[in-house]
Amino acid sequence: MKDQFGWALDNSYGNLPEIFYKRMDANPVSAPKVVMFNHQLADSLQLSSDLLQKEEGAETLSGSRFPEHAEPIAQAYAGHQFGHFNMLGDGRAMLIGEHLTGDQRYDIQLKGSGRTPFSRGGDGRAALGPMLREYIISEAMHALHIPTTRSLAVTLTGDKIQREKVLPGAVLTRVASSHLRVGTFQYAAAFGDTEDLQALAFYAIDRHYPDVKNSANPNLAFLEEVIKRQAELVAKWQLIGFVHGVMNTDNMTISGETIDYGPCAFMNEYDPATVFSSIDREGRYAYGNQPYMAAWNLARFAESLLPILDEDEKKAVELAQEAISSFSAAYEMEWLKGMRKKLGLFYDEKEDAVLIKELLELMQTHHADYTNTFLALTFHLQEENSLFNEKDFMKWHEKWQNRLSKQDKSKEEVQELMKKHNPAVVPRNHLVEEALEAAEKSGNYEVMNELLQVLSQPFSHSGEIQQKYRNAPAATDQPYVTYCGT
């Protein structure tokens, strides 16, 4: 049954063993006010946009009161953070329930809603800026066809929080297929028993991979499907120049959605060593390392499943190793497939991998902008891209044209394929910062709304409307740095 806001909440996670969560009470704030609201997402979830933005709706989106049938919990999980294993959990978020619409089930989580039993001494609150950042990036990722959690609303709490300076507090309403993480399974393996681990696996299978239930070894098939989905996800990240920034195992979902947009950013000049996070001093999660770190995380996932892969420990290890060994090929296949489309290639040829590698090397050598280079190739914008004037690039361009000539496709068909896979706009870091500054300093959300409107149609190639959002930032000696939002 739906309540007045349209919520139809269920609580299947609460049927798991109680080690996986803690029940939560409301955590009121002083003056909740919805400042960003996703009407398109609300419509798809069959929610009332009007009521949710009013006073009572703001109270539910801030965690001050709960919708009908909500059974709020904070989820327990562990994780390797920069290679070090820690007990974690929802330290500043609560899951108020799972919203049902048709045959779909979506977690509704309030991020920044206050202390939980997993807060580890923190206040459980979030600042406005990081919540707005997640709203922008997650919605941009959705428009770019990257599997992602979504953002329904950002609600000011009316309270101040103390960080390096006093900041306005806010709560993000996050929508996800689920919040099951690799770290959830690591937690089960470390702190539960085999029955707990199997219960969690069956729950994840029922929720995300029901087709594997009839497999000879459902747990192994489950592992294989998660590996495949993560290979597809990270390939999509690489294809658009996205740097997650903090690929800890607790930030990798079982569903294959991108989650937790803390120190994330988009690469401007192509460089595999690109790092934005202030805390990633060794480049562990650099752009070029993301596929390797995904494989590392999945190896930790496989380790956590060993007790239920086979009763014989040696056999279980062999099964896990074989499954993990499939990641590299799966990733490479997805990435090559995507790169071919970015270059207008309809069919596979052996020389494609070399052609693509040579282009990327040229882009790195000449400090070419990643997004705009592919856009220039799509629309033949030689005058806008200095790379086209380089002799070594001209040789490459001739090879590319020869490769295209082998296809029985017209120039128009090639361009249409490229237009569908080369976005005109991505959430450029300087534009995101501009929008956040306007909102935080003066309460001006128009800059953010205009940016979101453009980012919602990255493949429309609408000329003047997108032009100012296509420009790379002005050169500076100061590297762009992002921070884990708290």
Image (spheres, rainbow, N blue to C red):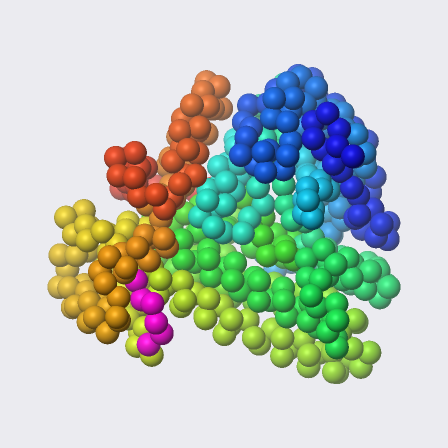
Horizontally, is 246 left or right of 353 in the view?
Answer: right
Residue at 54% x, 52% y is 147
Quarter of the image that includes the N terminus: top right
Task: Tell me which secondary structure the magenta stretch mostly adopts.
Answer: loop
What is the x, y in percent for residue 442? 46, 18
Q: Residue 167: which quarter of the image? A: top right
Segment colored magenta = 344-349
* Frontmost residue, 449 versus 159: 449
What is the x, y in percent for residue 55? 67, 17
* Frontmost residue, 224 versus 245: 224
Q: Is residue 346 magenta?
A: yes
In the depicted structure, whether residue 327 falls above or below residue 90: below
Q: Residue 332: which quarter of the image? A: bottom left
* Frontmost residue, 67 versus 95: 67
Q: Is residue 9 visible?
A: yes
What is the x, y in percent for residue 199? 82, 60
In the depicted structure, whether residue 444 falls above or below residue 429: above
Residue at 50% x, 40% y is 139
What is the x, y in percent for residue 180? 69, 53
Q: Is residue 121 visible?
A: no
Residue at 78% x, 41% y is 10
* Frontmost residue, 403 versus 407: 407
Residue at 63% x, 56% y is 255
Horizontally, is 222 left or right of 349 in the view?
Answer: right
Q: Is residue 115 magenta?
A: no
Quarter of the image that includes the C terminus: top right
Q: How many marks?
A: 0
